[in-house]
Amino acid sequence: MKIAVIGAGAVGTYFGARLAAAGEEVSFLARGRQLEALRNRGLRIESPAGNLRLLEVRAADSCAEIGVADLALVCVKSWQVPEIARTMGPVVGPRTALLPFQNGVEAAGQLAAEFGWRRVLGGVCRIIALVESPGVTRHVGGEPLVGLGEFAAGAEGRLAAATHAFRRSGIRTENPPDITAAIWEKFLFIAAVGGVGSVARAPLGAVRERPETRAMLEGAMREVLAVAVARGVRLDAGAVERTLAFLDTLPADGTSSMQRDIAEGRPSELESLSGAVVRLGKESGVPTPIHAFIQGSLVPQELAARGGPGGGGPA
């Protein structure tokens, strides 16, 4: 299978490397120092699940250079999806499947607006990983897992092929009966953990152990649950308890990608996480005071990182 990984960050390089090692034809869309490293030095994965080194990596700086793929993993940050979708035409053919692996709940719809729902699969992934240096990705913790599903009739063949490729690579792969609910359940987790961790400026262990911040985590999760139910998503009431139990199994020193981006002055997924909870809550008539507090507290740093009022950081 020819696979295009659109975005060579931690998620894209980890899953792309596993797929390549299993024999799939994988190309990475990258830029800057990451592109240079992939082309000249290959890709190294450091992981409790087993280290991996790819000495030869297909890396490109445009979708035209990659060409039509059977499967495109869209692994850019959530706020980058609309823009990258407008450049993905050369990768998308009549039988291409598009698989978004974003933290929010809007990426699939943004891709469908460009290419139609029949081409878009639903995807969730769980992994704690970071790009340690150009060409080196470190899997910090959590068993890597992907969940794949379909939104529209006619995608069954694409779903089966993608599922087979991931399973053949050794990655734990599931097909949830309701992929929309699965995406929202991950959103419930990452919006709360990313938001509370960013405000508290503390790793996961400290946040979950303090009664005050644990209460914020649970409250933030319950706000997402209420918004999901109001929007017709079949997310059951046990999602919060399951998520808190899962959170307690993660490494104490873990941090979310949003938290790391904010701490380091980079543009983050704030508006796609807590910002989206607030926005979708308003549309659905659901109050979201915890996420409103998170968004309001962090927006000055976000604007500064994007070169807006209050700062002159990188766009």
Image (tube, rainbow, N blue to C red):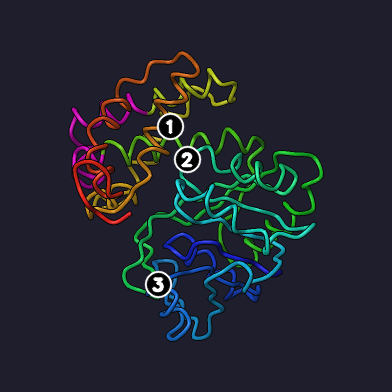
Judging by the rendered image, the residue that carries numbered circle 3 is 32
Q: Residue at x 34, y 27 (%)?
A: 220
Q: Residue at x 75, y 54 (%)?
A: 158
Q: Label 1: few (<14), some or many (≥20) within 10 Å? A: many
Tell me which amino acid carries mark 3: Gly
> For the N terminus, which image quadrant?
bottom right
What segment carries the magenta color?
A: 197-220
Question: In whole angstroms, how far apart are the C-alphas of marks 3 and 2?
Answer: 26 Å
Whether residue 280 appears in magenta in the rendering, the answer is no
Residue 68 position within the rendered picture, expressed as x and y whole percent measured from the top left: 71, 67
Tell me which amino acid carries mark 2: Gly
* Relative side of 200 to 118, left or right: left
Tag 2, which secondary structure? loop
The reply to whether callout 1 and callout 2 are in contact (CB within 8 Å) is yes
Name the one closer to the observer, 53 or 5: 5
Q: Residue at x 19, y 42 (%)?
A: 310
Question: In whole angstroms, how far apart are the C-alphas of marks 3 and 1?
Answer: 30 Å
Name the one closer to the observer, 21 or 89: 89
SS assignment for the magenta stretch, majority: helix
Judging by the rendered image, the residue that carries numbered circle 2 is 104
In front: label 3 or label 2 = 3
In front: label 3 or label 1 = 3
* Relative side of 160 to 54, left or right: right
Q: Residue at x 81, y 44 (%)?
A: 154
Judging by the rendered image, the residue that carries numbered circle 1 is 276
